[in-house]
Image (cartoon, grey):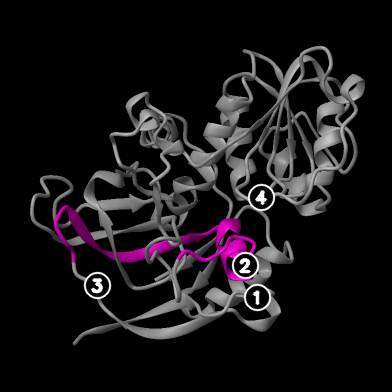
Amino acid sequence: METMTAWRVERPGPIATHPLREAALPVPEAGDGEVLIRVRACGVCRTDLHLAEGDLPPHRAGTVPGHQVVGVVEAVGAGVGEPAVGDRVGVAWLRWTCGVCRYCRRGDENLCPDSRYTGWDADGGYAQWCVAPAGYVYRLPEDYGDEEVAPLLCAGIIGYRALRRAELPEGGRLGIYGFGASAHLAAQVAIAQGAAVHVVTRSAAARELALALGAASASAGAPPEPLDAAILFAPVGTLVPPALAALDRGGTLAIAGIHLTDIPSLRYDEHLFEERTLRSVTANTRDDGREFLALAARHRLRVSTTAYPLAEAGRALADLEADRFSGAAVLTI
């Protein structure tokens, strides 16, 4: 039996306890409707960190994380027409939906109660091989290398959905709180659409990157002008009140993360009155993914990455927790 190197979440806990452990696992096989992918790169997401540390309750024991997977199709299961063997494809967070519930039927498959997720409900890309349902993999823009395109599959797609949920008006003023993998891509999309982007982050390196990408301002304090919309990428609930307070009348704050620490009490007159809106973001639809990847093909995005070999997956998560890099970390396999 052929085996592969993979990393599993054996026992969730603080990253210092090394919850991610290397293992030799059987190379998976493509079942009906699935494709077998030889992994070439996998983005490292904060969601992987939440899973490893237990902020996200594990859905199964010993899961292989990773849901920004870039690779080549090596085999296809019964009933698969596309993609074909040899195609480069991407695997993202959303892995499966039922297709028949009220949410799926109305186009909100991201809200499907029976949805399944890569690297949470099934093994992901912190490995040399993975399988995925053929209907949930993406064709990738050709003008990006493997390391560059990997972060687009979650950081990019979720940032794009968060930007849509924030309802930024044309030429509006957007606030971005936290400036990691997802934020630095969403900022570029907003700037390309004519927005003035104001970044709030405690990281000096992230502020420097934001300005280099065209942000109107970058600081550790409040934005310099009222905002028409804002996105909270940092998983820090205490940032919600000041972000709401920074909104102009009718503004919307979208919270992009899957996990958030507790939100302090809000004052109606200071944070919500004058039709300010607070919204969450839950996963994405496949249409979100296709739209964003098509946009990335038309407007070449600058993707800031730090590469780690697969053997150093644990160090990549530790560096993510400690904010030791700007942009996105990517495992290269």
Residue 34 against residue 290 in the figure, above or below: below
Which badge, 4 or 3, comes first in the chain's sequence?
A: 3
Residue 94 against residue 118 in the figure, above or below: above
Query: Residue 54 — which label?
Result: 2
Give the residue at mark 1. Answer: 13
Query: Residue 180 — which label?
Result: 4
Give the residue at mark 3. Answer: 28
- Amino acid type, label 3: Pro
Report x, y in % for residue 23: 41, 85
Q: Residues within 10 Å of mark 1 (few under 14, many from 20)?
A: some
Highlighted range, magenta: 30-59
- Amino acid type, label 2: Gly
Which badge, 2 or 4, comes first in the chain's sequence?
A: 2
Of the 4 image quadrants, the one containing the C terminus is bottom left
SS at mark 2 in the image: loop
Give the CA separation, mark 2 to mark 1.
6 Å
Identity of the residue drawn at 66% across and 72% down? 318
Which of the two marks, 4 or 3, is nearer to us in this view? Answer: 3
- Amino acid type, label 4: Gly
Of the 4 image quadrants, the one containing the N terminus is bottom left
Identity of the residue drawn at 37% across and 28% down? 102
